[in-house]
Image (cartoon, coloured by chain):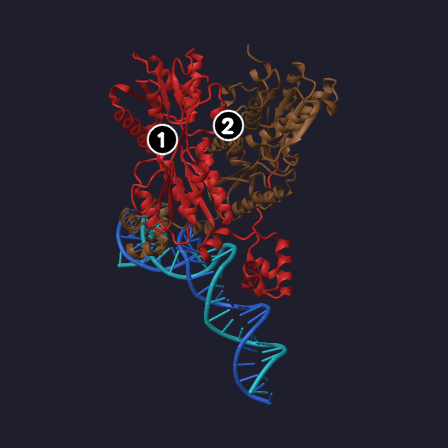
Chain colours: A brown, B red, C cyan, D blue
DNA sequence: TTCATCGTATGAACCGTTTCACCGACGACG
DNA sequence: CGTCGTCGGTGAAACGGTTCATACGATGAA
């Protein structure tokens, strides 16, 4: 229960005074030590040490303009998919001696805007963002103002913005084909709002595949919108599915967290998987293969996704490029049963 | 493949010129709109809009000194435990209109130091950190320099630093007692280096419990040090355990990710759980109960942990307090078997 | 001895805000 | 009719660095 006195931070001029040199010299010691004679350099360093001088980043940045920090805004830090992507970003940035600031928008456009502004005001070099709205005008504007922007997990709808994404239509379509191959003719889809692009695309992919296989999506597909894309959402969504008059025989989930909630709910309700209900997830997170019923899921190259995004951000020529990775269906027992 | 021109950002004086007022007035419009007449306010706002003016955060901060951003440094963003904690922090900060910048040290003291410095240079109000070393002198120094510091998931060894932690000794001891109760007399412990405090404490808790139950830790406990505290570490650690001459009958894991790797490896080796090898995890992450063999684990109040840490950080009186939560053993089939 | 040269160090300008002392105009009031 | 207070607005100082033109002393060449 103590309180410390808010002593003022030492500034460069305090250091200069103590070392009996000019502020310019201190700055030189900090930034181009070779232009300073060893003797004075020593004196200055001693003073810095003595006063525990920590340069003021705001002042430096204000004058110098540059900063080696990048920001990333994802939808949800507690979703392993995004943190794996973040990890890929970090690993690439580290090579270039950049640091990453991570923030999570919670799928909330206002929060996204707030962080966007915060990052811009603080002059980050670039921003990697998973947009929480279909609309990217604000991001185009940001780029026009000189901030590098890379869309994460979302193909750019405009050619002025770089993006790194995974083909969500293809992923969802592969999952749908797999289910239809297994004989399912009525599929529930626990999905988020279509304002989130991944959700819209996966829905479209499902439709595509069904049509292609000669089924009527209007009949074969029951899309249920859940408000949170996690285990809780999966639970409430699955409860709805179970209450449906003409109950589907398979449930496709927008991500593995949602599938986790679905599996849990099915188990509690005594519905066997996959015989009573097949389940497909999306993301193929670490634990997908280790679940009570190993989960069929659509694997995405998360680490690569982040790595490539950071690559684009750091590109010396600031090229604009749209990168798309292909997902891969990983089949496990939640659709095929044992053996 | 286009390149945009790096047009200079509009500044407050550009706005002033355009609106034909002084810079002071523009600043007033921004910060205390009520002190400006509606007419001029309108003019200024129009100019701001027109020039797409975004205030320079560095300049503002340099002059005003304050900022409503807090930082958090965790060991690993891809570990659900930490992201759940981060979530708790965010939720509390949001109430106070603060924003959170998250960084991950990767258990690397150098990275930790780098982020610490970065945050300090940018003048964050406070920092919540999961230290990657037992030593916290650098954090005490930071606090002495006026940055609020809250130790996360780690009781403070000094009374000048606030901390929010969970009693790791108690958690590990509870797990050990549970195993011994079940008849296990030889236990493997897949643990990280003891420089990480959680690891050291959990090891101590295990020892405590064994001694208390009349066993000789030297015989009953085989601690295996793994280099990465995730599924890969769990895998390599378990491989070592399986190669042991006098093979233990139970494996305690430093966290659930590690346990995940252990379960996977045991399954691949055809060792039944728990009859061939009981497994205990730590953290009780979301999926722990949903695994092929539901995992006995030590639950920690993650969200609360973060929430309380943020609470302390925001405390108007800047009190120093050490908070300790109690963990809870959640027993599942990975130790007790079916039924 | 003189002069150009080179290596060091200096100090002031500048970055874009906030803040504060001050000023003019105007209405109210004695 | 003079005085006072209020309101709206001004302009400059300050924040803490970086950068650059300049000064200065020592050295080497002519």
CA neighbours of label 1 inside 10 A, class few (<14), some (14 to 19), many (20+): many
The answer to whether residue B282 shows anywhere in this view is: yes
Question: Mark 2 or mark 1, which is nearer to you?
Answer: 1
In percent of width and height, residue A236 lies at: 60, 31
Q: To which quarter of the image does residue B6 belong?
A: top right
Q: To which quarter of the image does residue B22 belong?
A: bottom right
Q: Nearer the viewer, residue B189 or B294?
A: B294
Q: Nearer the viewer, residue A163 or A300?
A: A300
Placement of B141 over or under C1, stated as above or below: above
Number of the label disc, if any, that sits on residue A303: 2
Q: In this image, A325 relative to B200: left or right?
A: right
Q: In this image, A29 relative to B310: left or right?
A: left
Q: Which residue is mark 1?
A: B171
Placement of A148 over or under B80, stated as above or below: below
In percent of width and height, residue B232 lies at: 42, 22
- Do badges 2 and 1 share one subunit? no
Q: Residue at x 35, y 56 (%)?
A: A8
């Amino acid at each position: 229960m103590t309180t410390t006195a808010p002593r003022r931070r030492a500034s460069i001029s305090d250091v200069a005074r103590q070392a009996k040199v000019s502020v310019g010299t201190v700055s030189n010691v900090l930034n181009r030590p070779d232009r300073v004679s060893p003797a004075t350099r020593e004196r200055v360093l001693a003073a810095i040490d003595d006063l525990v001088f920590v340069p003021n980043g705001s002042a430096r940045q204000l004058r110098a303009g540059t900063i080696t920090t990048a920001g990333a805004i994802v939808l949800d830090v507690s979703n392993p998919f995004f943190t794996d992507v973040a990890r890929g970003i970090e690993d690439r940035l580290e090579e270039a001696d950049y640091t990453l600031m991570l923030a999570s928008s919670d799928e909330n456009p206002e929060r996204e805007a707030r962080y966007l502004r915060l990052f811009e005001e603080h002059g980050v070099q670039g921003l990697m963002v998973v947009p929480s709205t279909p609309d990217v005008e604000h991001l185009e504007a940001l780029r026009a103002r000189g901030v590098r922007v890379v869309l994460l997990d979302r193909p750019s709808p405009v050619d002025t913005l770089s993006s790194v994404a995974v083909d969500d239509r293809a992923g969802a379509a592969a999952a749908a084909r797999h289910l239809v191959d297994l004989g399912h003719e009525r599929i529930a889809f626990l999905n988020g709002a279509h304002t989130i692009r991944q959700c819209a695309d996966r829905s479209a992919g499902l439709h595509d595949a069904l049509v292609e296989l000669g089924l009527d999506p209007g009949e074969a597909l029951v899309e249920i919108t859940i408000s949170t894309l996690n285990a809780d959402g999966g639970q409430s969504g699955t409860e709805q599915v179970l209450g449906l008059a003409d109950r589907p025989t398979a449930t496709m989930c927008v991500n593995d967290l949602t599938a986790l909630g679905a599996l849990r709910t099915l188990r509690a309700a005594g519905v066997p998987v996959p015989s009573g209900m097949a389940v497909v997830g999306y993301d193929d997170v670490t634990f997908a293969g280790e679940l009570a019923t190993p989960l069929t899921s659509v694997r995405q190259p998360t680490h690569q996704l982040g790595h490539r995004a950071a690559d684009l951000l750091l590109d010396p020529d600031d090229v604009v490029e749209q990168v798309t990775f292909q997902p891969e269906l990983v089949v496990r027992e939640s659709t095929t049963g044992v053996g």
